[in-house]
């Protein structure tokens, strides 16, 4: 590497991080960042992006070692620092914003104490000055009630607010370099917008130098001036953001860009097919039941839909909207308080215990996190053999052959069969997860966020597998996701849930056509687009808060086109739209179309 | 396989040595434990009596070796019983929930609130001291603790998706417990077993010291300390060796558990 150029504020050269026996997980990485510049490190899990970011703090995770190279921040050689020197550097000159804000805060201390902690530890500001500065940062981060929010405890603010407060915590010492490690990955798209906007505002105002670590190109496109694409701990491509998006030079970059917009895997659904699963008037929730049968904490309110045989229904909504609860109710894990679930016209009892083995076999559930969905104490073969024995009475050689066939069906080598789940990658685990469901030979698979925990490329491969299996085996899916583009790629129908209410129920093709429910509009507009100016073009999303009035439209506090005096007092009626959808809204088709067109006109 | 640290190797050696002593006592003890072999009572260490003699002139080495049978045997049996009952109840409560969990938890909580040594003294003095009674009393006293721990762990595992998948498949409670939950909590349960074993040893020797445990002429280590306590004033080995036996056993078991627990923690970090 050449000598650092004079205007480089941060310069890294020949960085090498090894693990355990000496295998390099990061090798020969070098870059420079000018003052006030935001550099993005992008790559899939295992690409070394977080390892590089942590090396800026002179830190390597347990079992890893920084084996070589140079990291210079300002005029400090970070890797040459003593323990005391590092302690002085960390939190003061180089600050770190982690992915999970909830895990980064001490639940027993007030936010203000934690935000001002590093300024006090390093003796930079006295208490009053630090608190004044924190309030200023809260204001810059567009937090509601900047004077009062510091007095709260972490559980008293929302996830998006908490994530913004981590930024205040990092910026309180005016650091030379801020590292943002996937700070919005765990957030809903609607929340993500506000957090991104707040981050970008302060980074620009304070002229902060930053490294932004992410796997999401669209998010990075909003934040970064320059992007480095990483794979397997090595740099693949480095380019200014706009150029990387317009003219990716490296094949891997092109692959990443392609995985970003999943191509449709839908086929012409047999429209006339009889309903496989029919759900009507479903009410479910947690806690003791009131006298009228309603649960204390209702999660689903009067949800109904039908899945024709061989088709896919997508269920979308923000976290807490009840989409996972819906899957649990259909699987019989959470008995519904009211409503019916019918499988091929036959009533399914509410509880697992009351269902026949054949009914159980025909509906299988696959969970989001493959890490917790596979028993770590069992081998893959054992995990797959159990449903074969349970539903089909297979054991011995017949079961062995069937397990091998199942692994083949999910495109996994048979050699994996005797490993425990801990020895598999995330994508492999999710395939085993599917194989287990397939072992039952089901008609319907309930997929609960099955690609959310996976990298884009791996997730796309799992979607391909789902589409293939559907074609080969004539399966139907209930596909739950918070990611609109995934749902669009695989689903025939879409159901949008908001606080347990079915806001819109439409054919997938009609989903993108206006008029749509104002909430659908908000969700669709919130999905980051792969272009640099996107963040400036979207309107405010507001935080999800249920309406106070029992009879009001649940979306009222957030609705940009609500009608005062009507929406806040009267429950919205179901309203069929001519595009082939049904929404819950007071506005009729013409009026929705008019307001939505008017909104798009606005800059 | 992880290599043991020197401390845990030493601890393991001590535990194995005491277990061997208990098993092999009839063959390796130089004298029958109850026979008076010399007039020289509370004698010092000598070539003929490596651990001295007791207040009646019996060989201390033989008595300590035979005492190990009572102390280790009763403790192992009652700890196994306590863990078996506690873990079974705890797992069932976690997997079934509802009224069973409620009832089991409240009843066993009530049992925890009774001071253990006091309860043991009352039961033993009313029923009379015999080995089956001692085993049963210690097992009952330590069941609630084993229950609390295993229920707490099992509730966490029970909330995991792989258990939900098995439940949605239609599996019964027994399968959920045996195949899905238990294999994932073996390590903490084993650690707890060791810890509880130490408590039982202390309870048992404590009761014997108070005269309510193993009755003469048989003697566990607690009884040995009590019998020879008059030798304390002139430092007779007869009172010190059984006390040392209790100390080495409990410390060694503790150290061994520690190494298992830390080893596991380091694995998790990696």
Image (cartoon, coloured by chain):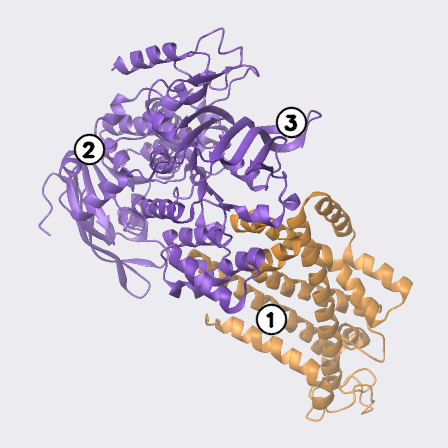
Chain colours: A purple, B orange
Tell which residue pokes out farthest to the bottom in this image.
B48
Q: Please identify, in this view, whether the residue under mark 2 or under mark 3 is nearer the observer.
A: 3
Percent x, y of residue A411: 36, 56
Give the mark nearer the N terminus: 2 vs 3: 2
Tell which residue pokes out farthest to the front in this image.
A272
The subunit letter for the residue under badge 2 reads A
The one nearer the camera, A305 or A473, is A473
The subunit letter for the residue under badge 3 reads A
Q: CA distance from mark 1 to mark 3?
A: 57 Å
Percent x, y of residue A246: 15, 35
SS at mark 2 in the image:
loop
Question: Image point 58% across, 57% down: which residue?
Answer: A390
The one nearer the camera, A548 or B171, is B171
Q: Is residue A264 left or right of residue B242?
A: left
Q: Please check whether the numbered discs 1 and 2 fall on a single chain.
A: no
Q: Is residue B43 above or below residue A247?
A: below
Question: Image point 38% across, 43% down: which residue?
Answer: A451
Question: Image point 74% across, 88% down: which residue?
Answer: B26
The one nearer the camera, B54 or A423, is A423
Percent x, y of residue A28: 18, 55
- Disc 3 marks which residue? A294
- Disc 2 marks which residue? A36
- Disc 1 marks which residue? B252
């Amino acid at each position: 590497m050449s000598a650092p150029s004079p205007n480089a504020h941060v310069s890294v050269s020949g960085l090498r991080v090894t693990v355990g026996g000496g295998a390099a997980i990061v090798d020969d990485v070098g870059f420079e960042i000018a003052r006030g510049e935001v550099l993005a490190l992008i790559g899939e899990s295992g690409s070394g992006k977080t390892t590089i970011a942590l090396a800026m703090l002179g830190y390597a995770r347990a079992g890893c070692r920084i084996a070589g190279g140079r990291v210079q921040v300002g005029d400090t050689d970070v890797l040459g620092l003593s323990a005391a020197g590092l302690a002085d550097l960390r939190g003061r000159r180089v600050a770190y914003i982690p992915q999970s804000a909830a895990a980064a805060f001490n639940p027993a201390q007030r936010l203000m104490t934690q935000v001002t902690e590093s300024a006090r530890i390093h003796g930079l500001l006295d208490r009053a000055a630090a608190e004044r500065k924190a309030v200023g940062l809260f204001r810059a981060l567009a937090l509601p009630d900047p004077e009062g929010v510091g007095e709260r405890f972490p559980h008293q603010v929302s996830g998006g607010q908490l994530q913004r407060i981590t930024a205040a915590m990092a910026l309180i010492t005016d650091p030379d370099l801020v590292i943002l490690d996937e700070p919005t990955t765990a957030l809903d798209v609607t929340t993500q917008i506000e957090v991104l906007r707040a981050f970008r505002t302060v980074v620009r105002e304070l002229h902060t130098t930053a490294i932004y670590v992410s796997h999401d190109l669209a998010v990075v496109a909003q934040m970064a001036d320059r992007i480095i694409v990483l794979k397997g701990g090595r740099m693949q491509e480095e380019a200014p953001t706009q150029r990387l998006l317009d003219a990716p030079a490296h094949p891997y970059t092109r692959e990443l860009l392609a995985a970003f917009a999943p191509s449709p895997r839908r086929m012409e659904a047999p429209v006339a097919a009889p309903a496989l699963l029919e759900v009507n008037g479903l009410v479910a929730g947690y806690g003791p039941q009131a006298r009228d049968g309603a649960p204390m904490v209702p999660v689903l309110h009067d949800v109904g839909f039908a899945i024709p045989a061989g088709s896919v229904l997508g269920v979308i909504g923000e976290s807490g909207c009840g989409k996972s609860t819906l899957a649990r109710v259909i699987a019989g894990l959470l008995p519904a308080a009211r409503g019916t679930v019918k499988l091929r016209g036959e009533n399914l009892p509410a509880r697992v215990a009351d269902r026949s083995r054949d009914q159980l076999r025909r509906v299988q559930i696959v969970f989001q996190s493959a890490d917790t969905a596979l028993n770590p104490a069992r081998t893959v073969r054992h995990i797959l053999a159990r449903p074969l024995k349970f539903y089909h009475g297979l054991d011995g050689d017949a079961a062995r052959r069937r397990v091998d066939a199942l692994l083949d069906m999910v495109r996994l080598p048979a050699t994996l069969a005797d490993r425990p789940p801990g020895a598999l990658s995330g994508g492999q685990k999710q395939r085993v997860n599917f194989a287990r469901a397939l072992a039952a030979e089901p008609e319907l698979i309930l997929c609960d966020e099955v690609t959310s925990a996976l990298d884009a490329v791996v997730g796309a491969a799992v979607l391909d597998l789902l589409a293939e299996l559907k074609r080969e085996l004539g399966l139907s899916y209930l596909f739950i996701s918070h990611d609109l583009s995934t749902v669009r790629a695989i689903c025939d129908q879409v159901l949008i849930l908001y606080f347990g209410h079915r806001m819109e129920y439409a054919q997938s093709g009609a989903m993108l056509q206006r008029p749509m429910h104002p909430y659908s509009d908000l969700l669709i507009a919130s999905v980051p687009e792969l272009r640099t100016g996107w963040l400036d073009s979207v309107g405010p999303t507001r935080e999800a808060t249920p309406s106070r009035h029992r009879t009001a439209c649940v979306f009222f506090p957030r609705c940009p086109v609500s009608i005062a005096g009507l929406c806040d007092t009267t429950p919205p009626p179901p309203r069929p739209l001519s595009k082939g959808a049904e929404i819950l809204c007071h506005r009729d088709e013409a009026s929705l179309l008019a307001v939505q067109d008017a909104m798009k006109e606005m800059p | 396989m992880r290599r043991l640290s020197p401390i845990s190797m030493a601890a393991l050696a001590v535990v194995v040595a005491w277990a061997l002593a208990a098993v092999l006592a009839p063959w390796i003890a130089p004298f029958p434990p109850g026979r008076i072999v010399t007039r020289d009572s509370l004698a010092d260490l000598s070539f003929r009596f490596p651990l001295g003699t007791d207040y009646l002139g019996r060989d201390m080495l033989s008595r300590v070796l035979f005492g190990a049978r009572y102390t280790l045997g009763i403790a192992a049996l009652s700890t196994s019983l306590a863990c078996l009952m506690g873990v079974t109840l705890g797992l069932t409560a976690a997997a079934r929930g509802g009224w069973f969990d409620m009832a089991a938890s409240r009843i066993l909580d009530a049992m925890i609130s009774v001071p253990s040594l006091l309860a043991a003294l009352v039961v033993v003095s009313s029923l009379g001291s015999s080995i089956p009674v001692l085993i049963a009393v210690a097992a009952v006293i330590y069941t609630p603790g084993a229950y609390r721990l295993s229920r707490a762990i099992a509730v966490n595992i029970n909330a995991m998706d792989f258990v939900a998948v098995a439940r949605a498949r239609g599996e019964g409670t027994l399968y959920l417990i045996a195949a899905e939950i238990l294999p994932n909590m073996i390590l903490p349960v084993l650690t707890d077993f060791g810890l509880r074993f130490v408590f039982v040893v202390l309870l048992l020797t404590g009761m014997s010291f108070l005269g309510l445990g193993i009755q003469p002429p048989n003697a566990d280590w607690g009884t040995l300390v009590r019998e020879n306590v008059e030798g304390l004033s002139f430092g007779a080995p007869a009172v010190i060796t059984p006390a040392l036996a209790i100390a080495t056993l409990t410390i060694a078991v503790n150290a061994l558990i520690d190494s298992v627990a830390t080893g596991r923690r380091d694995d998790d970090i990696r």
